Amino acid sequence: MAIIVNLDVMMAKRKMSLNELSEKVNLSLSNLSILKTGKAKAIRFSTLEAICEALDCQPGELLEFSKD
Amino acid sequence: MMSNTNNLIFKGLHIVAWVIFVGLCIEAGGLIVNFFYSLYEPEFVQNLYQNLDLTEMYKQSKWAFFNVYSFLIVISILKAYLFYILLRLMHKMDLLKPFNMYVSRQISLMSYYTLSIGLLSYLGRQVAISLTHQGYVIDNLNHFWADSQAFIVMGAVLYIIATIFKKGVEIQNENDLTV
């Protein structure tokens, strides 16, 4: 996929586990896992906002565009 | 959440489908057994399945007899198999989460088989009409392909439903992968 989600990178920088993030953003572990492994087809703005709030980062730090 | 009425209707339809399937299996089985029996005992042709008497046709032309009878057998087998697919679908389908590839494939399959039955029935009817013009008496076979147009219409409708269902599955999959 052309959009890469750097969720694991940000989580490592903030030293946050998937469980902690899941509780903070009120998203299930399976959905977070879908996002983390790059299988997600779309992300809601509300979810992006919640993750950025929890990880104290910008959307641009989480999402990256790569030409295949 | 499905209402009790919907549940009851679905169960009723399931029972009706089973009854029709058993009837179609008996018809197909009867026609096949009669066919092989008539190969070895030609006098049996006057007393085929459902008291069908094709003695005159058999005497005039064995080719015409086997040609017409083949149509009957293939159409009856296809009808039985169509209901088998329907029963399999009803047995495995979860009405709370119906949008999956399996259900989509089964509906597509049903549309292909229904269209095939309709087209074969129509072809059989045309063959029977041409035989009538050649002097054969085949009025007793009309009920085997009287519903050809209905099957063609049903096949077309099922195909449209299958296409819409496939789109529904795609939308559901995309929704499942939206976080």
Image: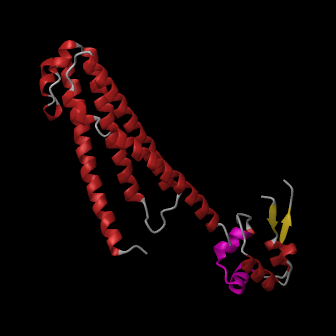
Q: In terms of image quadrants, where is residue B79?
A: top left
Q: Is residue B91 magenta?
A: no
- Per the rendered image, the range of residues in magenta is A17-35
Task: Residue at 23% x, 45% y: name it.
Answer: B23
Is B109 located above or below residue A22 in the figure? above
Which residue extends farthest top? B60
Q: With A43 as the anchor, is B95 left or right in this view?
A: left
Q: With B64 as the anchor, is B47 left or right in this view?
A: left
Q: Position of residue A30 (x, y in %)?
A: 64, 72
Q: With B140 as the anchor, is A24 left or right in this view?
A: right
Q: In terms of image quadrants, where is residue B73?
A: top left
In this figure, what is the number of numbered marks?
A: 0
Q: Position of residue B81 (x, y in %)?
A: 35, 42
Secondary structure, magenta segment, majority class: helix
Is B136 located above or below residue B98 in the figure? above
Task: Residue at 16% x, 23% y: name it.
Answer: B45
Q: In terms of image quadrants, where is residue B9?
A: bottom left
> Can you say which quadrant of the picture contains the N terminus of chain A?
bottom right
Task: Residue at 35% x, 47% y: name it.
Answer: B84
Is A25 located above or below residue A38 in the figure? below
Q: Is residue A19 magenta?
A: yes
Q: Position of residue B132 (x, y in %)?
A: 25, 21
Task: Residue at 43% x, 75% y: name it.
Answer: B1
Colour scheme employed for the rendering of this structure? secondary structure
Q: Position of residue B29 (x, y in %)?
A: 24, 36
